[in-house]
Amino acid sequence: DGGITQSPKYLFRKEGQNVTLSCEQNLNHDAMYWYRQDPGQGLRLIYYSQIVNDFQKGDIAEGYSVSREKKESFPLTVTSAQKNPTAFYLCASSEQGASTEAFFGQGTRLTVV
Amino acid sequence: KQEVTQIPAALSVPEGENLVLNCSFTDSAIYNLQWFRQDPGKGLTSLLLIQSSQREQTSGRLNASLDKSSGRSTLYIAASQPGDSATYLCAVRPGKGDTDKLIFGTGTRLQVFP
């Protein structure tokens, strides 16, 4: 089945730790995205990538980093600089072009302990 | 700056009712609008995608309309079922500026009771 796989489903981070969220897609999509979802707020864009080895900051990139070394993979690192990382993180992908449909993974819930 | 609003925030209806969810956006310059469903603790499932040149799209019991000039979209659910209970999100892709991202509303939480 084609789709987007995010792992882990649940992740716990201690203060001062960096953690990496995995996102893999087998849809052969060029574009990939990371969104953050908080209760009562709409999804907010963290980073996106339109092509391998290139990515751009979204609206709330501070405290996060990404890489895009392979077309099918777009991992997100939540660094210790992110002061309020507890949230639900969603990865998405789409074909290139503004008229295309976006597809989402099942999400990773990150909690700071 | 494009903003997306969904009203109501929550809706509870008996099974069998036809219902309408609303989505409004402030800038009519959009490429498309997409409706999603989200179950608790889960990711988003794409329901319908309407391009800016289209007026509506249908999938099964779902029908989404788009009135770009007035900045509105509606999602019509016919003969609602308890399995339709979920949060419904709409998102627009701006037609100028940041065309690479989707801008989301905060969703309508729907409960259909037997």
Image (cartoon, grey):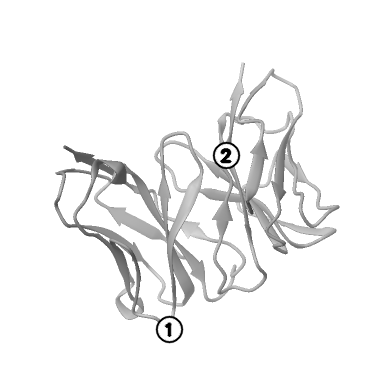
Does residue A1 appear in the picture of this structure? yes
**Could you say whether the residue bearing mark 2 is in a helix, strand or loop?**
loop
Against B35, is A66 above or below?
above
Left or right, A82 with reference to B2: right
Q: Which mark is residue B53?
A: 1
User: How dense is the environment of label 2, judged by Cα within 10 Å: few (below 14), some, or many (20 and up)?
Assistant: many
User: How dense is the environment of label 1, judged by Cα within 10 Å: few (below 14), some, or many (20 and up)?
Assistant: few
Q: Amino acid at mark 2?
A: Gly
Against B26, is B84 above or below?
above
* Mark 1 and mark 2: Cα distance apart in space: 32 Å
Left or right, A37 with reference to B114: right
**Could you say whether the residue bearing mark 1 is in a helix, strand or loop?**
loop
Q: Are marks 1 and 2 on the same chain?
A: no
Q: Which quadrant of the view contains residue B39?
A: top left
Query: CB of mark 1 within 8 Å of CB of mark 2?
Result: no
Left or right, A66 with reference to B63: right
In front here: B89 or B14? B14
Look at 79% across and 57% down and name the residue there: A71
Look at 40% across and 54% down and name the residue there: B105
In front here: A28 or B60? B60
In front here: B70 or A69? A69
Q: Amino acid at mark 1?
A: Ser
Residue B78 position in % (x across, y down): 21, 59
Residue A25 position in % (x across, y down): 70, 51
Look at 59% across and 67% down and name the residue there: B98
Does residue B1 appear in the picture of this structure? no
- Pointer 1 chain: B
Against A15, is A30 above or below?
below
- Pointer 2 chain: A
Residue B81 position in % (x across, y down): 23, 46
Q: Which residue is mark 2?
A: A107
